[in-house]
Image (tube, rainbow, N blue to C red):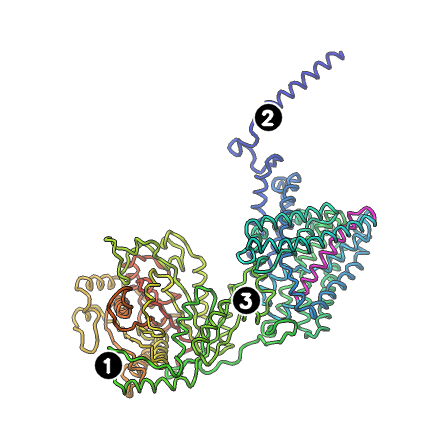
Amino acid sequence: MLQFSETIISIAKSSTQLKAALWSREAVGEGGLLSGQDPSGFNRSDPLRLWIIQLGVIMMTTQLLALGLRKMRQPKVIAEVLGGILLGPTAFGRIPGFSEHIFPNDSQSYLSLTANIGLCLFLFLVGLEIDAGVIKRNARLSATVALAGMCIPFGFGAALSVPLYHRFVDPSIQFTHFMLFTGVAYSITAFPVLCRILTELKLLDTTVGIVVLSAGVGNDIVGWTLLALSVALVNAGSGLMALWILMTCVGWTLFLLFPVKMALQWLARRTGSLENGPSMFFMTVTILVLFGSSFFTDVIGVHAIFGAFLAGIIVPRGGGLAIALTEKLEDIVSIVFLPLYFTISGLSTNLGLLDDGITWGFTVAICALAYSGKFGGCTLAARFAGFSWREASTIGSLMSCKGLVELIVLNVGLQAGILSPRVFSMFVLEALLLTFMTTPAVVFLYPPHMRKRVTATGASFVHADDGDAAPRRSHFRRGHDDLERKERFLVVLDKIEHLPGMMSLTQLIQPPPPYQEEEPDARSGSSDSSRESHKRAVTPGHEEDITLDALRLIEITDRTSAVMKYSSFSTDVLLQTDPLLTIFRTFVELGGSDGGMGSEVKMVPYDDLAVCVKDEAMHKESQMVLVPWIPPTYIHSQAEHDGADGLPIEPNTPRHVSTNPFESIFKSGAGGASGSKHPSSALHSQFIRNVFAMCPADVMLYVDQEQSSSGSSALKKGFTAGKHHLFLPFFGGPDDRLALEFVVQLCAANPKVSATVVRLVKREAEAELSAPASGEEKDQGSKLCDEERNERINALTVGSTTQAFPDTVYGHANTETRLQSSTADSVLWGRYATPPVPHAALFRITFETVHTPLPLHTLIDHIAASAATLRPPAIGSRGKGASKARFLVMCGRSRRLAVESHHTELKAVMEEHGNAHVGNEVRKTVGDVAAAIVLSQCEANIAVVQAAHVALD
């Protein structure tokens, strides 16, 4: 019987081995969904499928929550923590089968591995954010706040740990370990989240923001050191072992701070990383140092995140190297890794454990003591340092922000077994509540009109009120007879590519020095008396010089690198070091301006850019705001520059190409070169529209087409320095009247500026076909061949009767306001076109009146003819000719009280030039007239003017 049993067992074994051998021949995971396998099933040998599902669920949940919380101005960490809690046993985990299929227990080790890798990268970024220079510059004020913000909360946490330990913690855990973790969780401040809150609330350049940043840096360093001490004590078996762990950790820290840091400095210089950004080799070495340091601190008994934090501290700061490293890593960390980590935290958080009154009583006590300890300690310290009670309470509220840093501490305590799941859930709720309270508390305690901006470097903190601007001067209001000279201009600088256009416009606006005289034109035959009259007309113009104020706009996003770029600098430092302001300031000084130039730097989120322009215009009492814009290049290939015979096309010949410049700027459509879309240009158009809508002063949008048109470098050669010719199409309305007044002012202030003003009056088609051209008035219809003219008229009359109301009118314009506007047009035109006593500047302005049924086509033909006349001779040409002037088309935006609606004709212009689909966004941004000029691809810069928003008297 015994022999039989052994035989049976051997056969069974052999069959089992055979079966295993046959199964091993099958490819694991090859069949997939088509073979009937469950795609969400967990497979230890291939966990990628489930990991991707988990990542998708986590990211979608987090982003959906962030969309709603962003409206409440809450940081993204709130959405990440809430998403983790919802996906855990508190909410979705109660759905039958959810946790078993999406987050099974066997898969959490892989999810935890990925999350902890991301956590090490995040702590490395936190170390990169910490700049010792911030602490040194503001040590006098921030040291007191940081010290009080650590000691008092730590004491409160230690006191509360006694009843918590006896009620909720396993007696096997030593009380000292629990007390230390509780004190660290109470005393720590979430520095990364704090930076984003300061950015969102525009407090980075305030005295409160600078002190909070400095105190937060010191608080973070001490907090992570205490956390390392806590972990070392927990992992040590005895007091002597804990001492050895701490001494080893100190030795490793010194090793990193001195020899390794110097080696990285040498490597950064050797590889050119300080000048050109981190090289591939430098990045490789840095990542090896990061994970090597994490490995060492982990194996000696301190958590790996402390080693990653130390690696971030030792990276060289020169040349913006730390910022460049942050830019390379922050997106993948914040989008993928951190949500994974918070989900792991949420899976361990079960708010259902807070199921009795005692537990909720302790939870309320934890929240109350945590906030009162931080708020009270930092507020009293800030008040002692010299801040007002309102500023001190704001500092206390900001320092109470916990965010993800406390969650990291709590997770470390949970993994070490010091915190029970119930206590962990209590503290997670406390961290979430205190972070949520930070933004509304600061908005309530420190409203914008009571903020103090830093106007000097260092810790001296000269305050400057950031309240409402002084009452507007009378020049903000424009009546019919208000022809005052514009003297105060606000120049908006946001991008380096906009700088040439602003320089060109500034040169036009600035009058020449008093000793500069206009050179006589050989063709004009001007007499000596006329030259003397011009000279006399110029001299009084310098009695009141032009004042320029430059507003440097810096968009700050929610990225860590964006905060790092400017959080450690005061406004005065940026005013002296910003390259755009430096170049523009030098240009203005070389132009000989006696009025000087004021400068201002504003670092705000994108949504507040237009509001910032409005506030600065009111504060500076600017009469006109100059805003730049460059349309994208819509001619991409040399074939588009050449005709069928291989010869270049004339610059002003309409090109019938299938590209649409405005589609790529404002709308996403089929047009545009290579089918690409330009969402950034669409955002910029929205910024321009917001400036037009909000600004209390007149606004000029300078459309710089020279940088986007082909061959512009050749066209720029041959121009006379400082000589400009302006072309103004006058249709009527407040914007056109402003443009006419400004053209007259420019010609009066600068003898090198001349102008052509054409009043375009729309005439019906029948009148155009029958009435001849008068001697005084030039009829553009006579310049067109009969076939082309009749074809255009027939095309435009069809559907013109369906235009019920002008599309370019804001609100309702009644008969009275239109009559007032038309009367103002006639009065102003008569004042300049046929003045009783001509001004000297009017001799340099040519006035014409043109009657045509096709005003936009007529305008395009006029611009093409004028540009061809003013264009310099070709390179290598022997013809001497007269010196040429820069050509600028100035037109009104005509979005209010427009005399004519050009909607139908603009549609015909689009079709003729191969741009058949331009959305309403275009006309709403630049107006119909400017849109027609750009669409016709006339190689001329355009200045679109809008008068200030006031009602007609």
Nearest the viewer among 150 and 309 is 309
Identify whether 802 is placed above or below 511.
above
- The part of the chain drawn in magenta is 212-238
Q: Give the residue type that dot 1 points to.
A: Gly
Q: Position of residue 10 (x, y in %)?
A: 69, 16
| Disc marking residue 525 | 1
Q: Position of residue 863 (x, y in %)?
A: 28, 68
Quadrant position of the N terminus in the picture: top right
Query: Which callout, 3 or 2, points at the residue further toward the start of the chain?
Result: 2
Q: Position of residue 273 (x, y in %)?
A: 56, 55
Q: Give the residue type that dot 3 points to.
A: Met
Residue picked out by circle 3: 603
Magenta span has 908? no
Q: Residues within 10 Å of mark 2 (few under 14, many from 20)?
A: few
Tag 2's secondary structure?
A: helix
Tag 1's secondary structure?
A: loop
Q: Give the residue type that dot 2 points to.
A: Ser
Question: Can you tell which of label 1 and label 3 is closer to the viewer?
Answer: 1
Identify whether 394 is placed above or below 479.
above
For marks 2 and 1, give the CA distance.
102 Å
Q: Position of residue 103 (x, y in %)?
A: 63, 42
Identify whether 687 is placed above or below 45.
below
For marks 1 and 3, give the CA distance.
54 Å
Q: Which secondary structure type mostly characterizes the magenta part of the structure?
A: helix
* Relative side of 218 to 336, left or right: right
| Disc marking residue 557 | none
Query: Which callout, 1 or 3, points at the residue further toward the start of the chain?
Result: 1
Residue picked out by circle 2: 24
